[in-house]
Amino acid sequence: MNEQIVKVKNLSRDFDHFRAVDNISFEVRTSEIFGFLGPNGAGKTTTINILCTLLMPTSGEAIVNGFNVITSPNEVRRSIGIIFQDPSLDERLTAYENLNFHGIIYHIPVKTRKERTKEVLDMVGLYSKKDSIVRTFSGGMRRRLEIARGLMHRPKILFLDEPTIGLDPQTRQYIWDYILNLSKKEGITMFLTTHYMDEAEICQRVAIIDYGKIIAIGSPYQLKNELGLTTLNDVFLRLTNHGIREEEASDKEQLGQFVRSRRLR
Amino acid sequence: MDFDAIRMIWVRDLIRHFRDRTRLLGSISRPILWLLIMGTGLRAAFNVHGIPYTHFIFPGIIVMNLIFAAMQSTISIIWDREFGFLREILVAPIPRTSIVLGKTLSGSTVAFIEGLFVLAFAPFIKIKIPLTHLFLLLTFMFFVAFVCTSLGIVIAARMTSFEGFGVISNFVIMPMFFLSGAIFPIDNLPYWINIAVRLNPLTYGVDFLRRILLGIKTFPLHIDFLYLTTFALVMLSIGVFEFNRRS
């Protein structure tokens, strides 16, 4: 077993007129909960997209579960589960259909597929809703279903991009309890991003990224001690303290806002 | 090749299609509009090859529904890729060839079904289809649907932002439809239009369907078939290439 399940070395990614990820290097240890924190537009999602083989790096190297994301994308894909920032469930399908299709594309045999579908639906408390169309689900229910789906093929590492964004405190608590529980019971490595610093306190280690560069990495305790501060929130504000970000929305982000506002209706 | 994944993409798209009522409505109203209003209205003015105008445009209306449906299902890929279910498919261990093939097959099936809606109008405008020709006709309708969908896949793969279906309709579907010989004969056209008509894959699709349905033709059979096959293969290759490129 690899001691480090994710190894990133001098990774950069350029877009048309800016550098989203700027020469970052870090490692994630097997079975730990690793937090990837940063203000809006700092490069969190870009990094996750590279690690998930959706995006090519401009330069540098990334190894996930021993496989290179550039040369062995399919092996990487088999090793990971992802909960995206924007839900990627099919809203016109039922909860059961969403999970069943997931099982098919990960080649889980029929019998195991049925067992696991029930198992993960039970785990997120949605078994009674299995035949409802996802469109009728609340935001929290969708998130839970997505977490269930991400776990169905027993990934070695689970990426969670803002798993609790836009959820009420109860649902947030519920989802974090799951994540902690899963990490304890199954030893799945968690790689997560979040805006909520109080949530990041549960991570074993965090990296703080700003303007595409990693500016601090370590356990929350260690970072707080080094700066003599009491909360991770203070650490975050101290390190990234250059005012509110004027983030220029790209076409895709504008579209994303449009999608989100439509979902509210 | 990952047949499980191809089948799953196909089944999923069909389920989605049949749960969407508004699209079904569009695919029925379009042919009515063209056959009833255009066909009947222009009937007095045109008499092509000695056959009624409604008959003359009928094969073209089938092809129009095929390409409309094909484009609609492929353009949804853009949305799906950035914010939807396609991301789930893209991060799964599936060869990109299988994704492209699955998408093309599901788009073709949906388009084929919408083509059948037009075919159902044949008895009402008194077109008789010999039963012996029916199988060939259906096979070829699916083939034309496949060609249109492969073109749609390439457009969707190359478009990075979502400009909306209106743009595709105005700049791709309509020009292709008008330049396909669907609504006027292509025997005596000026040089510049003729080139566009001959490059247009729909021309060969319309030509073939018209041969089966009405017994009139412009090109030899093998030319229709060869051009469409080549076109689809080229489009699929570009599609696979584009999907393999992780931007």
Image (spheres, rainbow, N blue to C red):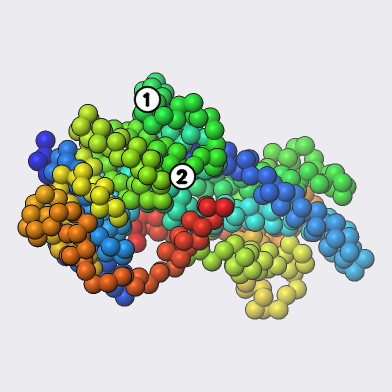
Crowding near pointer 1: few (<14 within 10 Å), some, many (20+)? some
Residue B214 circle label? none
Q: Is residue B173 visible?
A: yes
Q: Using the rendered view, name the quadrant where residue A181 is placed.
A: top left
- Residue B238's x, y, as percent? 43, 59
Side (left or right) of A262 relative to B157: right
Do tags 2 and 1 sit on the same chain?
A: yes
Residue A139: numbered disc: 2
- Assign a secondary structure to mark 1: helix
Mark number, residue A119: 1
Inspect the image, locate mark 1, and give the three-letter code of the amino acid beneath it.
Answer: Glu
Q: Is residue A163 above or below residue B197?
A: above
Image: A238 above or below A88: below
Q: Label 2 vs label 1: CA separation? A: 21 Å
A76 vs A131, left or right, is: left
Q: Which quarter shows the N terminus of chain A? A: top left
The residue that appears at 72% across and 48% down in the rendered structure is: B25
Subunit bearing disc 1: A
- Mark 2 — on which chain does it sit? A
Q: Amino acid at mark 2?
A: Gly
Q: Name the one closer to the observer, A28 or B230.
A: A28
